[in-house]
């Protein structure tokens, strides 16, 4: 797989006011993202997510470090790079008095589209995002969901190879957020678009991202696939076994795949690396002790736990 | 330059500016109401003061110039202010743009609007106050218009630099700059009556020379031997300096995160 983004030692600080002290927002951040991936950057508010994504999107210059996106330097090759990338952010903002169609045409022209090509592209995007019935509605009169759809449509106007999404579903109702997530997945699968998204919504990252990185106070604390992070942090799926007459007499810590265990009255809580793989052998071992299991509860590991583990 | 790609980028700003003007009732106000008020009030004042026709023309040329420059520079000044007000600045600069696309596109609409104001005010001046706009001939008129639009471009570019640096706080500069320039360049009076020190400032404003050139057709003596040479050469130098200033401010905005701050 080719590398779409390479960032090495990215540092950025801002001065508060004219004479105020400088505040370091990013501390030597390194990151590599493969082409065709959906990569998530997670972190609380103020972690530096937007600053980092803005540097990669050529909207901000780093104080230190190097970043190459699609093989181009984000500072030196910014004009050429801008032709191949685009960005959508939360809280879509466009010119209030232009209609949906006019806004899309404006941005299309900024990317050098005109004539029939512009008309066709705008038409495609209006269809794709269900904006056709609203094409003559001015931006200020659109609902939040429609504004966000327009933001995504605008971000695709130049048929980018790489898309930056800065908290794309923030402020949307759950149904619309789900719809937008579906669109993001579809764009990645059907168009092979590389997507770098920031979010503080762990479920969203879990649903969309093949790989994630955690940013806190400008430092990249961990990155990897969900399973790799799980392994590294010793977090796993939860299996709770409820017994009729007390827990089965077993050395649970020695069972394959068990990372931790806890006994409580008639219940045993096990943390395993992969529940779907380990459950059958665990139940087989329990049945050999002739203990009767009356209930099994499974809970897959989620990003909230990983996030908590890393950031505290 | 890659035509027609560059043409479409320029057209993007021209079309946006035209659409905003078309939908904004205040834009019509700017173009028709205030220039109309200016011609009526200044013209009636000259009548009250019982001024001779040459002096009336001198003053009316000032009124027409002031409004034409003011309106022509607004579209350029607003080019980024629209984006700042809409909080969409980062999306514009995310696109592969050059400053020349913004300046030419918005400047084009400014030129058309300025021309319209000039025609309306010129017509009112001729109709109501017997001003003879045809005396300088087509060539003289075109040169004067060119001079006014160059000055409007300089003011507009300066405002762009201020917007990129200070954001919405620079809004007031869109109006204030042109008034300051117009105050110094001898709109309603000859530059010679300005106090010493201020008079020298007038010499470094190109519009001073274009006004002088246009008024000499109405019998007012030239104060400098080559007003067009001074006017055009100063305009070109200032335009280049302004372009460099806007470029520098943009670079600084990318460094300081101004584009992001203005998009929040």
Image: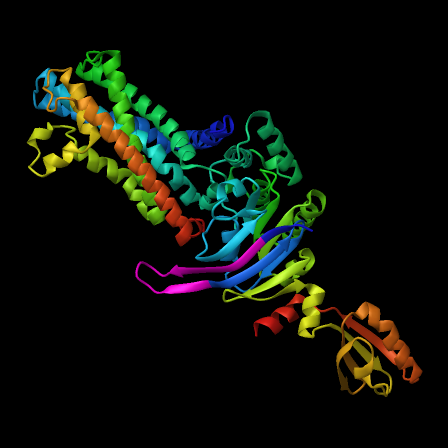
Instruction: Please check the rendered image and state whether residue A23 is part of the magenta-colored stretch, yes or no.
Output: yes
Q: Which residues are magenta?
A: A6-25
Provide residue B51's location: percent of width, then percent of height: 8, 20
Instruction: Please check the rendered image and state whether residue A250 is part of the magenta-colored stretch, yes or no.
Output: no
Residue drawn at the location 45% of the way across and 49% of the way down: B263
Provide residue B83's location: percent of width, then percent of height: 43, 42
Quarter assignment of residue B77: top left
Q: Is B245 left, or right, of A301 in this rendering?
A: left
In the displayed structure, A105 sits above or below A277; it is above
Residue drawn at the location 61% of the way across and 61% of the way down: A201
Q: Decide which of A80, B64 is in the foreground and name it.
A: A80
- Main secondary structure type of the part rendered in magenta: strand
Provide residue B131's location: percent of width, then percent of height: 18, 15
Is residue A91 visible in this depiction of the protein? Answer: yes
Residue drawn at the location 13% of the way across and 20% of the way down: B56
In the displayed structure, B173 sits above or below B235; it is below
Q: Is A22 left, or right, of A117 in this rendering?
A: left
Residue drawn at the location 77% of the way across and 80% of the way down: A269
Colour scheme in use: rainbow
Provide residue A45's location: percent of width, then percent of height: 51, 63
């Amino acid at each position: 797989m080719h590398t779409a983004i390479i960032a090495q030692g990215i540092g950025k600080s801002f001065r508060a006011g004219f004479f105020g002290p400088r505040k370091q927002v990013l501390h030597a951040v390194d990151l590599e993202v493969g082409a065709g991936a959906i990569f998530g950057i997670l972190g609380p508010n103020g972690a530096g997510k937007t600053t980092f994504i803005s540097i990669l999107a050529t909207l901000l210059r780093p104080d230190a470090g190097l970043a190459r996106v699609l093989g181009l330097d984000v500072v030196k090759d910014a004009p050429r790079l801008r032709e191949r990338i685009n960005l959508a952010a939360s809280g879509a903002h466009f010119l209030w008095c232009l209609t949906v169609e006019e806004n899309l045409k404006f941005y299309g022209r900024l990317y050098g589209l005109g004539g029939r090509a512009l008309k066709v592209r705008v038409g495609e995007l209006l269809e794709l995002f269900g904006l056709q019935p609203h094409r003559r509605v001015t931006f200020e009169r659109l609902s939040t969901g429609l504004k966000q759809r327009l933001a995504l449509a605008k971000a695709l106007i130049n048929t980018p190879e790489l898309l930056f999404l800065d908290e794309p579903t923030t402020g949307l109702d759950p149904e619309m957020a789900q719809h937008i997530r579906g669109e993001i997945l579809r764009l990645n699968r059907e168009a092979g678009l590389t997507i770098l998204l920031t979010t503080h919504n762990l479920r969203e990252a879990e649903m969309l991202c093949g790989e994630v990185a955690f940013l806190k106070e400008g430092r990249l604390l961990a990155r990897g696939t969900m399973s790799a992070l799980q392994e590294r942090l010793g977090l796993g799926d939860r299996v709770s076994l409820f017994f009729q007459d007390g827990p089965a007499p077993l050395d649970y810590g020695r069972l394959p795949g068990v990372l931790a265990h806890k006994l409580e009255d008639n219940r045993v809580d096990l943390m395993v690396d992969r529940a779907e793989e380990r459950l059958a052998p665990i139940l087989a071992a329990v049945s050999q002790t002739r203990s009767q299991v009356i209930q099994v509860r499974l809970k897959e590991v989620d990003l909230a736990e990983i996030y908590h583990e890393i950031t505290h | 330059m890659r035509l027609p790609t560059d043409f479409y980028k320029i057209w993007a700003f021209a079309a946006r500016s035209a659409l905003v003007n078309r939908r904004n009732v205040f834009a019509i106000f700017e173009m028709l109401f205030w220039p109309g008020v200016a011609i009526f009030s200044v013209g009636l004042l000259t009548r009250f003061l019982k001024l001779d026709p040459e002096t009336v023309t001198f003053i009316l040329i000032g009124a027409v110039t002031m409004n034409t420059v003011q309106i022509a520079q607004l579209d350029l000044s607003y080019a980024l202010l629209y984006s700042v007000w809409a909080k969409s600045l980062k999306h514009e600069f995310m696109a592969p743009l050059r400053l020349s696309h913004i300046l030419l596109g918005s400047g084009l609409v400014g030129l058309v609007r300025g021309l319209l104001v000039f025609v309306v005010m010129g017509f009112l001046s001729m109709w109501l106050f017997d001003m003879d706009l045809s005396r300088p001939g087509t060539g003289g008129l075109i040169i004067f218009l060119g001079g006014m639009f160059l000055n409007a471009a300089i003011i507009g570019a300066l405002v762009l630099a201020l917007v990129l640096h200070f954001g919405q706080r620079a809004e007031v500069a869109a109006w204030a700059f042109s008034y300051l320039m117009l105050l110094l360049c001898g709109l309603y009076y000859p530059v010679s009556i300005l106090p010493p020190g201020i008079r020298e400032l007038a010499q470094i404003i190109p519009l001073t020379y274009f006004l002088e050139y246009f008024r000499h057709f109405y019998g007012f003596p030239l104060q400098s031997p080559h007003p067009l040479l001074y006017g055009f050469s100063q305009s070109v130098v200032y335009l280049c300096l302004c372009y460099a200033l806007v470029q520098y401010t943009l670079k600084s905005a990318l460094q300081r995160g101004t584009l992001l701050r203005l998009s929040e």
